[in-house]
Image (cartoon, helix red, strand yellow):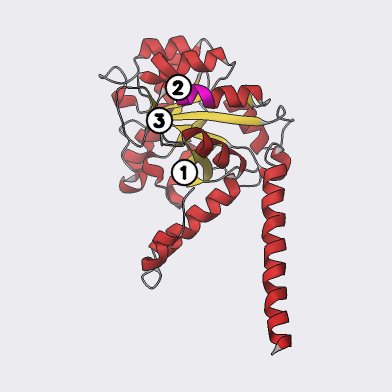
């Protein structure tokens, strides 16, 4: 009996040491992209007018941009990110790709001035059909930001899931959205974010054929050069009661957060385990 308890203690001790080692690796390697990958952070709205899970207050957004600035992070461009994926050159120390989805007008009115204040740039994934519509960016605002270092990517023409479209409609969403952005900006558009994060093999192949160098899903995690370039992760950030603490945790422990999210999703989508999904946190 004594041997059995010693064996159990040894197993738990080994598991604890292993988990502690992994967390220490993620923590101390969080700022070294060679070890833990590049964080691609993702926002949507930044304003005080709405209170949804996709809306962050300018105050909290500024606190996060200030943290990046004060801790030596460098926002990178689409070209730098694409070069990294293709094994060309080195990124600056502590790189981060800052992205926004949908193209809300507050990206220009609220987020853009804050980013300029802290020397940050980023990429806004635009839904073409919503440009010039109430609550969304205008072409003039897009062009103004484009001349000042903010870059743009496609979120397609209509934001319909690409997996729901036939080949002709899918190519229209991919090719024409890219062409329109490049026409207005006078520069190459290299990145796309899949609407609703939906993709399959056909979507990935069509995206590559349309001339994009990389595509983002809604899966959580960091990106390595050896990852599938058309199935990349991001680190999403939302408003909440502990917005900054949440931001800092996800930024540093992106891999751990991703593991918990994927475990939760696996449990939630497995009939025999579904009842246990709510016990798996999604930090």
Q: CA distance from mark 3 to mark 1?
A: 14 Å
- Residue with the mark numbered 3: 44
> In the image, which residues are magenta?
59-63
- Label at residue 130: none
Q: Quadrant of residue 1?
A: bottom right
Taking the spot 65% from the left edge, 30% from the top edge, the residue there is 95
Q: Residue 179: image x %, image y %?
A: 42, 24
The residue that mark 1 highlights is 217
Give the number of the mark in front: 2 or 3. 2
Which residue in the protein does label 2 denote? 59
Q: In terms of sequence position, does the residue under pointer 2 or pointer 3 come before the other?
A: 3
Residue most extreme to the bottom: 1
Q: Is residue 62 magenta?
A: yes
Which residue is at 55% across, 23% downward? 65
Closest to the camera, between mark 2 and mark 1, is 2
Label 3, secondary structure: give it.
loop
Q: Is residue 49 magenta?
A: no
Measure the alpha-carbon separation of dots 2 and 3. Answer: 15 Å
Q: Judge the density around disc 3: few (<14), some (14-19), many (≥20) Cα neighbours within 10 Å.
A: many
Q: Position of residue 204 (x, y in %)?
A: 47, 45
Q: CA distance from mark 2 to mark 1?
A: 28 Å
What is the secondary structure assignment of the residue under circle 1? strand
Give the mark, 3 or 1, whose residue is nearer the N terminus: 3
Circle 2 — which element?
helix
Task: Give the x, y percent position of residue 16.
Answer: 68, 63
Residue at 55% x, 54% y: name it. 259
**Depicted 106 relative to depicted 263: above or below:** above
When the figure is inspected, residue 262 is found, relative to residue 29, above or below; the finding is: below
Query: Can residue 97 be seen in this snapshot?
Result: yes
Q: Earlier in the sequence, mark 2 or mark 1?
A: 2
């Amino acid at each position: 009996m004594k041997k059995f308890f010693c064996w159990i203690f040894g197993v738990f001790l080994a598991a604890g040491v292993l988990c502690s080692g992994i967390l220490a690796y993620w923590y101390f390697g969080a700022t070294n992209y060679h070890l833990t990958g590049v964080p691609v952070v993702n926002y949507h709205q930044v304003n005080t007018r709405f209170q949804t899970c996709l809306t962050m207050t300018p105050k909290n957004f500024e606190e996060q941009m200030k943290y990046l600035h004060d801790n030596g992070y460098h926002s990178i461009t689409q070209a730098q990110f694409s070069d990294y994926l293709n094994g060309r050159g080195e990124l600056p120390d502590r790189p981060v790709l800052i992205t926004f989805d949908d193209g809300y007008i507050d990206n220009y009115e609220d987020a853009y001035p804050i980013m300029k204040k802290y020397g940050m740039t980023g990429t806004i994934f635009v839904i073409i059909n919503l440009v010039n519509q109430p609550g969304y960016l205008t072409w003039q605002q897009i062009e103004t930001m484009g001349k000042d270092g903010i870059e743009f990517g496609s979120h397609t023409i209509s934001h319909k899931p690409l997996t729901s479209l036939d080949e002709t409609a899918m190519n229209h969403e991919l090719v024409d959205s890219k062409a329109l952005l490049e026409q207005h900006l006078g520069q190459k558009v290299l990145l796309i974010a899949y609407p609703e994060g939906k993709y399959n093999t056909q979507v990935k192949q069509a995206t590559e054929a349309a001339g994009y160098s990389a595509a983002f899903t809604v899966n959580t995690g960091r990106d390595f050069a050896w990852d599938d370039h058309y199935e990349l992760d991001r680190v999403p950030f939302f408003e909440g009661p502990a917005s900054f603490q949440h931001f800092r945790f996800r930024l540093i422990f992106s891999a751990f957060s991703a593991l918990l999210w994927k475990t939760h999703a696996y449990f939630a989508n497995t009939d025999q385990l579904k009842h246990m999904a709510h016990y798996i946190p999604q930090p």
